[in-house]
Amino acid sequence: MNTIPQLVAHRGYRGCYPENTLLGIEAAVKAGARYVEFDVQLSADGVPVVLHDDTLERTSDRVGDALAMSAAALAQVDVGEPCRFGVRYLGTHLSLLTDVVAYLNQHPEVTAFVEAKRQSMERFGAEQVAMAITEAMASAQFQWVLISFEISVLRCSRALSDQPVGWVMRNYHGPSCTEAEALVPEYLFVGARYLPGTEETLWPGAWSWVIYGVDEAEQALDLGRRGAGFVETDEIGSLLEHPAFRLAEGT
């Protein structure tokens, strides 16, 4: 049995490029990623935009409530992460979800994990968030999965379409297992830091495990041996260059 997990590019190629940008997603795909993950919030006019926070200050040189701005205004915001990269990526604008769909349509071999964020659900409601994302993804010619910490939006998504879903758990203990068994998501996400520090196998189930927060090849390979089908990383390029992952890709 192959225990080498698939690698998922977290927020694009976050280790080397501004997170959740078309630039970073393109870089991850060019590096060889076949799975990418990115975050989605809704603008004030209900348009899905690729953004993790509900504010702008962490990834741009501006301050403000992103969810109170129109999509047209957000598309003009520079999200080149000056605090991390200085002026290196100056001029990298925030993307609409439809921009990313248009790019990934050129790469139908890539699967996208699209994370719906809690703040937008609190502002607009889970149903509106699920509907807006589903509509924006309607032209997708690649596989995609709606994921979230919030089970409500996953249930709304299932009512709208037959797209697979992934639940991002906040912890790893018995009650979460019970909730997972009730939801039966196609994918189950949890942070590596929440796993017990043992060699025990991950909970069995109908889902595929995705473990995030993994930037070292040996840790990724260990998680594969424990039952993780996928690991999510900021360092997609360097991990794909590791001999074990190159072998798994047949290179």
Image: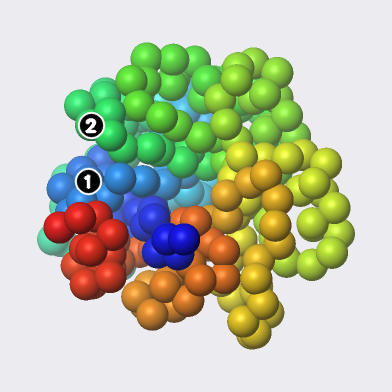
Closest to the observer, 114 or 32: 32
Most extreme residue toward the bottom is 197
Residue, disc 2: 107
- Residue 19 in the image: above or below residue 187: below
* x 57%, y 64%: residue: 227
* Image quarter of residue 97: top left
Query: Can you see residue 79?
Result: no
Amino acid beneath label 2: His
In the figure, is residue 83 to the left or right of 89?
A: right
* x 31%, y 37%: residue: 110
Where residue 29 is drawn, which disc sits there?
1
Q: Residue 191: image x %, image y %?
A: 58, 66
Q: Secondary structure at mark 1?
A: helix
Of labels 1 and 2, earlier in sequence is: 1
* x 26%, y 40%: residue: 22
Q: Residue 170: image x %, image y %?
A: 70, 60
